[in-house]
Image: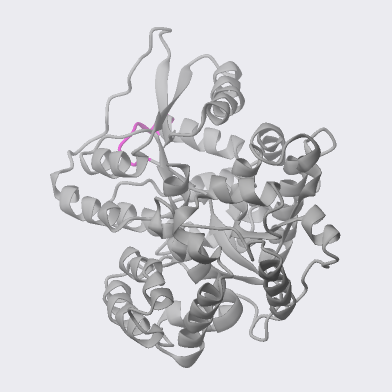
Amino acid sequence: MKMKKVLALTVSVTVAVGLLAGCAGGGKEKAKTGSSGKEIITMWFWGAEPYSQEAMNRIVRDAYNKSQDKYELKIEYRNSVDTDMTTALAAGKGPDIVYGSGPAFVMPLVEAGKLEPMDKYAQEYGWEDKILSPIYETGKVNGKLYSLANSINTVGVFYNKKVLDDNGWDIPKTAEDMEKIMDEAMAKGLYASVTGNKGWKPVNENYASLFLTHYAGADNVYKCLEGSLDWSSEPVVSAIEKSAEWYKKGYLAGKDYGNLTFGESLQLLADEKSPFFIGPSLAYQFATSYFVDEKEKNLGFIAFPSTEACPEETYTLSVCCTLSINAKIADDHKDESAKIINMMMQPEFMQEMTTVWPGYWGTPLKDLSSVDDSKMSAVSKAYVDTVKKTAEAVENGNFGYYTNVFFPAGTQQIFIDIENVWFGTETAKALMDRADVEFKKELDKGLVPAIPKPKK
């Protein structure tokens, strides 16, 4: 379920808002009072693991509740949070603080009038000056701010330092270097890389996003997203074909791609069965279960190595979730919701959360220099280093686009179908012809979120 909440925006979510928006009740929902006599502020979150819930409850809920005596924050953990959220908001209800799976998830909620503009809070708390510009801009719809990303996320390459050292392999600097290592790994009976979409097909979009960034080039993807270049253009089709080449060569776990989850893949990486795991940086939260004791120091992470289309260190830009404010709650609850969101936009918060829960709270701030990792585990330290490098690259314009963040839902689904090309049941050109048709519909409807421009 963690993967679902972070890695995919389903078509049904968008449809739900459209179908139910018309039956939403008017007016503001009456504030509820708890047994303590305090007014209840509500926040819904995905069904995180117990240790993650404990961290949220202690570092967010308890800290806020101790800070004042009028309100009481309650956090509900829901496995079906996306569907629950859109259904409740469409009926004029729902929590005070709105969880979202990304900017594209937010778009239909804004169009339906369910979210509160946050510009006055941005001014009050200085968010625009503090938050990475490309991340901040993704929260805007028609020039107004409606959401903030909780964390920066990217797709890159986890590697096992011991496997590289034992085989005399250097950390790859180019994609060709990486391909050479993967060929040699397979010759030695290892996996080229370990990854898989077992039980959750949208894992495919990790690799669709990565190949778009590094083989089509971020600037060309930007042009596609603004509508000035077709998805069926040569650079994009070639990138999809390159992904199929990697799949057919066995670079994506070979025949086991459909048989592995992220957890199983990271177990194999920790057990030295492969040099690489290609996946999102949020997978650090899973790695804590496998890179333990002496193995902990073996985990490394790099941006995907350089290619001809993407020679500089570049990170495919994503977020773990977004935080918004329900438009139908009382004004004082809106103020308190903004205060709670602001608590989560501090380097001290990232430090405290990452110490116990690496991988999910890489606060997207311009200045992360005050985050102290001296008392963190090796995995948490590695995550902090990844977030800092990603943030620096993003602020300098060296970023690409993750499909579930920047692509409208229908277009996103087509890129999840990239496996059709891998299996040979559809050509890359045919897949991208479908993307052109769907994207034009969604662009005309205003469903494409704000797209930050990368450096050329």
Asked if residue 127 can be seen in this view, the reply is no
Judge by depth and name the residue closer to the eye, 84 or 256.
Answer: 256
Give yes or no for residue 447 being in the magenta stretch: no
Q: Is residue 192 visible?
A: yes
Q: Is residue 13 above or below residue 394?
A: above
Say whether residue 74 is left or right of residue 303. left
Residue 289 placement, left or right of 380: left
Q: Is residue 361 left or right of residue 443?
A: right
Vertical arrangement, residue 197 with respect to residue 172, above or below: above
Q: Hey, which quadrant is residue 318 in on the image? A: bottom right
Identify the residue at image location x=34%, y=66%: 413
Q: Where 175 falls versus 139 (above or below)?
A: below
Colour pattern of the rendering: one colour
Q: Which residue corresponds to the image point at 81% horizontal and 44% vertical from the top-left? A: 297
**Foreground: 219 or 198?**
198
In the rendered structure, which segment of residues is drawn in magenta? Answer: 326-332
Please name whichever residue, 324 or 294, is drawn nearer the observer in this view of the structure: 294
- Taking the spot 33% from the left edge, 54% from the top edge, the residue there is 110
Front residue of 188/297: it is: 188
Instruction: Please state the horizontal and vertical placement of residue 200, each as a whole percent of the image.
Output: 40, 53
Q: Residue furthest bottom?
A: 234
Quadrant of res 295: top right
- Decide whether the magenta segment is chiefly helix, strand or loop: loop
Q: Quadrant of the C terminus?
A: bottom right
Residue 154 x %, y %: 60, 59
Please name the residue shown 66% across and 40% down the image: 290
Residue 400: x, y in percent?
58, 71
